[in-house]
Amino acid sequence: MTTALLDHADELFAALAEPNRRLLLEHLGSYGVATATTLAAELPVTRQAVTQHLAVLESVNLVSSARAGRERRYTVHVEPLTAAAKWMNQVAALWDSRLAAIKALAEAPPD
């Protein structure tokens, strides 16, 4: 991950650990832009809980909001997720190469 995203990795993964937040991201991805009221209709939690979850997601830059009259409209930002996925793929590749080396040693004929 880039340095800025790596600095906030703990917060990003903590935000994603909550199932309702992941559902919010999925629904927001489908809608493009939505209000907390619209999103609350899709989840088994109150509008106030949705607003709190959105605040957490906004604090790690996974969503942003803009005021439109009396409502606040939320939009997903995929860049932090893309950076996290890239980092996880790099870690997975390192482990794959380490495991391949261990396998080669284990399967090598004895001296």
Image (tube, rainbow, N blue to C red):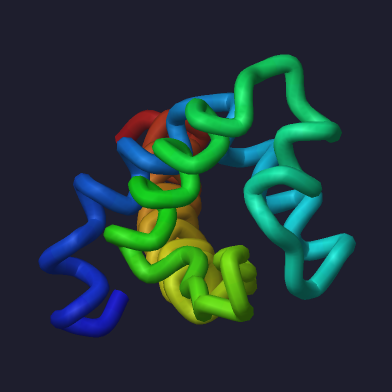
Residue 14's spot in the image, x, y percent?
Answer: 32, 37
- The image quadrant where one finds the N terminus is bottom left
- The image quadrant where one finds the C terminus is top left
> Would you place residue 86 above or below residue 35 in this image?
below
Q: Nearer the viewer, residue 54 or 102?
A: 54
Q: Which residue sits at x=52%, y=77%?
A: 67
Q: Which picture quadrant has residue 43?
A: top right
Q: Nearer the viewer, residue 19 or 35?
A: 35
Identity of the residue furthest to the top in this view? 44
Residue 60's spot in the image, x, y percent?
Answer: 31, 61
Q: Which residue sits at x=64%, y=19%?
A: 45
Side of 94 where 64 appears, left or right: right
User: How many labels were placed on the picture?
Assistant: 0
Residue 17 visible in the picture: yes
Q: Which residue sits at x=24%, y=56%?
A: 9
Residue 8's spot in the image, x, y percent?
Answer: 19, 61
Q: Which residue sits at x=37%, y=50%?
A: 55
Residue 78 visible in the picture: no
Side of 48 where 3 appears, left or right: left
Residue 3's spot in the image, x, y percent?
Answer: 15, 81
Identity of the residue furthest to the front in this view? 70
> Would you place residue 69 above or below residue 106 in this image?
below
Q: Which picture quadrant has residue 88?
A: bottom left
